[in-house]
Amino acid sequence: ANTTLCRLNVRGNLVADVGAEALGATLARNSSLVELTLRSNRIADRGAAAIAEGLGANRALQTLSLKQNKVGKEGGLELARGVRANDALAALDCGENALGSEAEDALRKAWITRRRQPASLRLG
């Protein structure tokens, strides 16, 4: 496992679902990455689900930005599951996606259920 990479910013690199699937698998095994910025990468539900699965197994990531992607209801619901399973995450930005109210509510509930203060959750 990589023990030197602490921050990864791939903002605006057209990562899309295929790249997000690879990153999700990496997240599940990584123990050093504390910040991941995936803003503006055309990530949709399939990619968000892969990130969520990796997030559920990860114990190091503290900051995740999925702002300005194409994550919808299903991806948002999967992210809520990943958030519930992760105790390390302190900041999550899912703003400017198409989550819808059901997924936003699920994320809020997941965040509140397992959150220690201070914490940052951005939706909408």
Image (tube, rainbow, N blue to C red):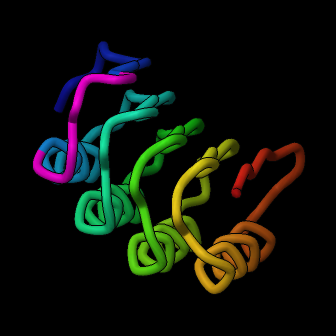
Determine the residue positioned at 35% across, 23% down. Answer: 12
As drawn, the residue found furthest toward the bottom would be 102
Residue 2, horizontal then vertical, whole percent: 21, 25
Residue 94 shown left or right of residue 1 in the figure: right
Taking the view exactly as shown, the residue that stands out farthest to the top is: 4
The residue shown at (60%, 48%) is 96
Q: Where residue 119 sits in the image (x, y, percent)?
A: 81, 46
Task: Specify the quadrant of the image occupied by residue 124.
Answer: bottom right
Q: Magenta span covers which residues?
A: 11-18
**Residue 94 relative to residue 24: left or right:** right
- The count of marks equals 0
Quadrant position of the N terminus in the picture = top left
Prevailing secondary structure of the magenta residues: loop
Q: Residue 104 in magenta?
A: no
- Whether residue 36 sits left or right of residue 29 in the image: it is right
Q: Is residue 109 above or below residue 25?
A: below
Toward the viewer: 44 or 82? 44
Residue at 47% across, 68% down: 79
Residue 90 screen position, x and y as percent: 69, 44
Q: What x and y, as percent, mark residue 5?
A: 32, 16
Between 90 and 122, the one lying in front of the other is 122
What residue is rendered at 82% in x and 56% in y? Answer: 116
